[in-house]
Amino acid sequence: MNNLVDRFLKYVSFHSTSKAEVDHIPSTPNQHIIAKYLAEELKSIGLSDVEVDKHAYVMATLPSNTLKKVPVIGFVSHHDTSPDFTGENVKPQIHKNYQGNAILLNKELNIVLSPSDFPSLLRHVGEDLITTDGTTLLGADDKAGVAEIVTAMEYLLEHPEIEHGKIRICFTPDEEVGKGADLFDVKKFGADWAYTMDGSDVGELEYENFNAASAKVIVQGKIVHPGYAKGVMRNALTFASDFVLSLPSEEVPERTEGYEGFYHQISHNGGVDEVTMIYIIRDHDMEKFKARKEFFKKKIDQMNEKYGSETFVLEMKDQYYNMKEKVVPQMFIVDIAEQAMKDAGIKADIKPIRGGTDGSRLSYMGLPCPNIFAGGLNFHGRYEYVPIQSMEKAVKVIVNIARITAERVDA
């Protein structure tokens, strides 16, 4: 694992931010650059069938080293970073033997990473933390996962005494904008099942995620001079505000947890003449998810009854579904990951994802794909960090999954 940290630091030097509302993959040209770099690195460590396609998907194979007939397993991570915060010119810093103090990320700008704001820091006292200088995100989501997979493959090549079957790996573009699985060739990948290394803190093991839909609401108004507006002006901002307040105030992300679903307004743009609102709708339970969508539609209908036909126009579409339905029939793949963690001295923290991963869509494309921790925390912002020891544990889990899968053939 000697190359793990250097490898990660190299990856975060690439500006590979993806971009929403772009109709091609990858959504940004810089993702081609990191994809080509990763392909060359995979060749250099000795993997075979290395390929990077025109959409910046990187695939490779670690050949089996056993005569047993072992299932083909896969590991998947994404090489893009979130557009929520800048990922250009990342300046990583390593803080050795962290002692629970506030970390001054940037003296000039007085940017501080403090356990009073982020209590998760206190779970990593005594460890070595990688942060930024506070002016960018770090990119541990999901370059930590990429580094862990590459390092694990390198470790298995260097330790042929560890029996394993054929292992396929893939690094995807545009996961952060919901398109990481759009052009994933499951048939070519050829794995019986896979794991995304895209979770957060040590021990996370997830095979349940939200059912997800997006909703675009366009509100039509009519603008005239305010001095002559009586009986004529129709203020789209007023209508939109009425709709926002009609939704359950407690069913929002900041007031829900666990299996609780929500309605979340992620943008609100416009003026008196027209307003566009974007919502996401989430629930783990399929029937509750359907009910949420129907409730949302009903509220739109009520607004049109109140303010006039076609004042509100709704465009709603499903985004992804709960992978649980596809994973539960093959729960042994979760059992393998849980045992791999136990063998690495880690207690598995099995819980639902309050979000989605490439794995949720891949599961519905025929590749059951639970999610495993990659170690990073505070994703998508200036306070992102990753403990080196957490990445090392993730590498051990990957190696253990490969070993246990081969051992279970004789079980």
Image (tube, helix red, strand yellow):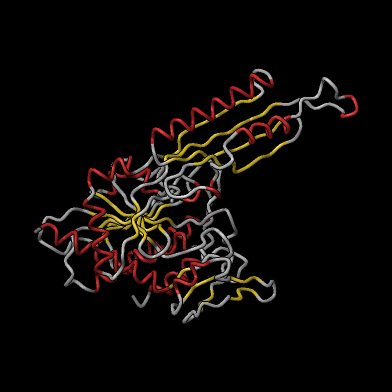
Residue 339, image x and y in percent? 23, 62
Q: Which residue is drawn at 42% across and 71% down?
A: 7
Quarter of the image with the C terminus is bottom left
- Residue at the right extreme, as displayed: 227
Image quadrant of residue 342? bottom left
Residue at the spot 39% in from the left edge and 48% down from the top edge: 358
Quarter location, residue 220: top right
Of the pair 141 and 204, the residue shown nearer to us: 204
Where is the N terminus found, in terms of image quarters? bottom left
Q: Is residue 186 above or below residue 32?
A: above
Up/down of 178 relative to 296, above or below: below
Left or right: 45, with 410 as reference point: right
Residue depicted at 46% across the width and 66% down the height: 11
Q: Where is residue 194 in the image (x, y as percent from the top left)?
A: 29, 52
- Can residue 222 be spotted in the picture? yes
Image location (x, y in percent) of residue 125: 46, 77
x, y percentage for residue 85? Answer: 59, 57
User: Residue 86, located in which quarter of the rendered image?
Assistant: bottom right
Relative to 142, say whether 268 is above or below.
above
Q: How many numbered discs sit on the rendered protein?
A: 0
Q: Can residue 51 be seen in this view?
A: no
- Nearest the viewer among 201 and 361 is 201
